[in-house]
Image: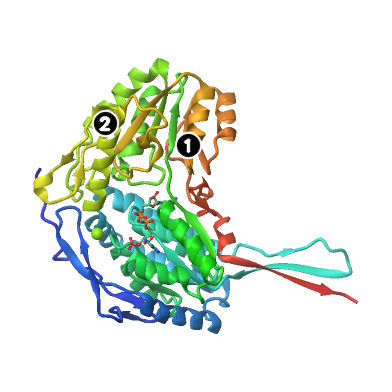
């Protein structure tokens, strides 16, 4: 592999928390190493915040909230400041994309076009919504006025994962800030950099101090302290189902804070023989699992194919997979970068061993790649002859590994699609509108894509059924979780 030098020299790597109006080290002075999966190099030693820092940030967030500079500001003022932040993000888009790629190994083309552009678009959309949402009057008759108003919920903790570091944060901070809350963002240990930079830019944009704070740190310390804090009103979490359940427990054992959870998935991508376009289905099936090295909660990780087209589809998916060999993500041509770290690589390789020992057939890949670079690359991997009860069909692998499962008819496809602890997304490829609607209604999940793999935009809600989560991100519905509903009943004499 021709590896371009990692351009860390000409870009400042943020490494301090943003608490109040200041960039600070952790109170303990502790740090953790931020490592690039591109080549294993240490990018920075980052402040390892823990409960003392969380206390400081919550105090600042509460003070800002009660002072009302943000919460009670005219919505058009909040809109103007959030749009200013979006403009600053746009001015720094190349820098943010580079930070994201260095930090988690995403292909640079995708960091810019998807993660950073998507985060900016999300923030703009919620900023615009600030002064366009009306409250309600209840149908009381003439003897009373029943006002139903939305109030910000207060101090919000956002705990997010490493697979789309800035974008998952933006899905939280954009509606939370637009609704008038103070937010404390804890990025994942593997991916603190863009969050820290956004914290700085928020202050520059004029977000009042204490309203948008960023605390890098470990899950068990900083994350848990946010989850258990008696003065945090709500936690918005994206991450694994296992840790999502911890937040429910933290809430129950502390102040019954609201908890919204966006957790794991095991998306069934169901391709019927009457798919309108087999080539398109194959292309999206491959991109749906190899995009972001498969580290996507909505990765199309179960490829379910009607048996009459099984061989034809699989051959096409394998051919596309062969063209997506891993490479340095700083190279504009690369489509498959490393997985996020050593632990994740070992986990993915272990699942590949498990799949083989369960009796699935390897049709492509299956090994580590580019080990000499010091990076954590895994080959695009396709399993065939998978049955839905195998671990590789039930558990979230979070790597570039797809499990191909054959089915006879719609009934069998539906039964297998729903035989999962997860219910985040599904896909159905068919030319039969009746079949599409029936499947869409019967699959237990938050989003069903028909004749595409990753449909949707900021205007539609996103979230899971079953153990994929509680609550919805995106769309105007996201405001529900960042708001309290207040009833004011005025009796008229
Ligand atoms: P994770 O291990 O659950 O971590 C998510 C966040 O929780 C991180 O900030 C992590 O901090 C923190 N955390 C870990 N242990 C904690 C604890 N004991 N108490 C409090 N906080 C804790 O998930 P991940 O590995 O970063 O991300 C992959 C997962 O995210 C996958 O399961 C994927 O499906 C899911 N995901 C879901 C969506 C969705 O919208 N449904 C979107 C993207 C990803 P540290 O990393 O610093 O420990
Ligand atoms: Mg990193």
- Would you identify the image quadrant in which residue 488 lies? bottom right
In which quadrant of the rendered view does residue 310 lie? Answer: top left
Badge 2 local density, few (<14 within 10 Å), some, or many (20+)? some
Work out whether residue 83 or residue 431 is closer to the camera in this orientation and state it: 431
State yes or no: discs 2 and 1 in contact (Cβ < 8 Å). no
Mark 2 vs mark 1: in front? 2
Residue at the image position 35 percent from the left and 24 percent from the top: 279
- Picture layout, residue 487 above or below residue 263: below
Comes first in the chain, label 2 or label 1: 2
Residue 345 coordinates in the image, percent (x, y): 23, 47
Q: Quadrant of ligand 1?
A: bottom left
Query: Residue placed at 58% from the left, 75% from the top?
Result: 74
x and y, in percent, of residue 317 in the image = 30, 27
Expressed as whole percent of the image width and height from the top left, the position of residue 385 reads 34, 24
Which residue: 41% across, 43% down?
298
Residue 348 visible to an observer of this rendering = yes
- The answer as to whether callout 1 falls within 8 Å of ligand 1 is no
C-alpha span from label 2 to label 1: 25 Å
Disc 1 designates what residue?
426
Q: Mark 2 points at which residue?
A: 356
Label 1 secondary element:
strand
């Amino acid at each position: 592999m021709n590896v371009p030098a990692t351009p860390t020299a000409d870009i400042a790597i943020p490494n301090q928390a943003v608490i109040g109006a200041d960039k600070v080290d952790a109170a303990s002075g502790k740090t953790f190493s931020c490592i690039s999966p591109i080549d294993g190099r240490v990018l920075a030693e980052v402040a390892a915040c823990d409960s003392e820092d969380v206390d400081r940030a919550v105090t600042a967030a509460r003070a800002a909230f009660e002072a009302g500079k943000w919460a009670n500001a005219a919505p058009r003022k909040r809109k103007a400041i959030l749009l200013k932040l979006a403009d600053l993000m746009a001015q720094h888009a190349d820098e943010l994309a580079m930070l994201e790629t260095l930090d988690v190994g995403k292909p640079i083309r995708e960091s810019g076009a998807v993660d950073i552009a998507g985060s900016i678009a999300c923030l703009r959309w919620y900023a615009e919504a600030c002064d366009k949402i009306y409250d309600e009057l209840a149908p009381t008759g003439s003897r009373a006025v029943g006002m139903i108003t939305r109030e910000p919920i207060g101090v919000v903790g956002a705990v997010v994962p490493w697979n789309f570091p800035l974008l998952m944060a933006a899905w939280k901070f954009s509606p939370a800030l637009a609704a008038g809350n103070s937010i404390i963002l804890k990025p994942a240990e593997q991916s603190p950099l863009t969050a820290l930079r956004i914290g700085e830019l928020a202050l520059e944009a004029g977000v009042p101090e204490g309203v948008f704070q960023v605390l890098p740190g470990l899950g068990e310390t900083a994350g848990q302290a946010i989850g258990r804090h008696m003065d945090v009103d709500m936690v918005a979490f994206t991450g694994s189902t296992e840790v999502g359940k911890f937040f429910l427990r933290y809430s129950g054992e502390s102040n019954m804070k609201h908890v919204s959870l966006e957790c794991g998935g095991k998306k069934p991508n169901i391709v019927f023989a009457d798919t309108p376009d087999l080539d398109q289905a194959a292309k999206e099936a491959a991109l749906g699992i190899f995009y972001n090295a498969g580290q996507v909660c909505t990765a199309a990780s179960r490829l379910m194919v009607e048996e009459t087209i099984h061989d034809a589809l699989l051959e096409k998916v394998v051919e596309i997979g062969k063209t997506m060999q891993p490479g340095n993500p700083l190279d504009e041509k690369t489509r498959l970068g490393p997985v996020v770290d050593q632990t994740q690589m070992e986990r993915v390789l272990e699942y590949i061993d498990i799949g083989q020992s369960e009796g699935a057939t390897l049709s492509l890949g299956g090994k580590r790649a580019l080990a000499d670079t010091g990076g954590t690359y895994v080959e695009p991997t396709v399993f065939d002859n998978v049955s839905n009860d195998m671990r590789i069909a039930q558990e979230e692998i979070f790597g570039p590994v797809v499990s191909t499962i054959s089915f006879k008819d719609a009934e069998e496809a539906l039964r297998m699609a729903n035989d999962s602890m997860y219910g985040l997304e599904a896909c159905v490829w068919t030319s039969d509108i009746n079949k599409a609607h029936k499947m869409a209604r019967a699959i237990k999940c938050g989003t069903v894509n028909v004749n595409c793999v990753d449909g949707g935009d900021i205007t539609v809600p996103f979230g899971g059924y079953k153990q994929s989560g509680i609550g919805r991100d995106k769309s105007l519905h996201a405001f529900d979780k960042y708001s309290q509903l207040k009833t004011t009943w005025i009796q008229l004499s």
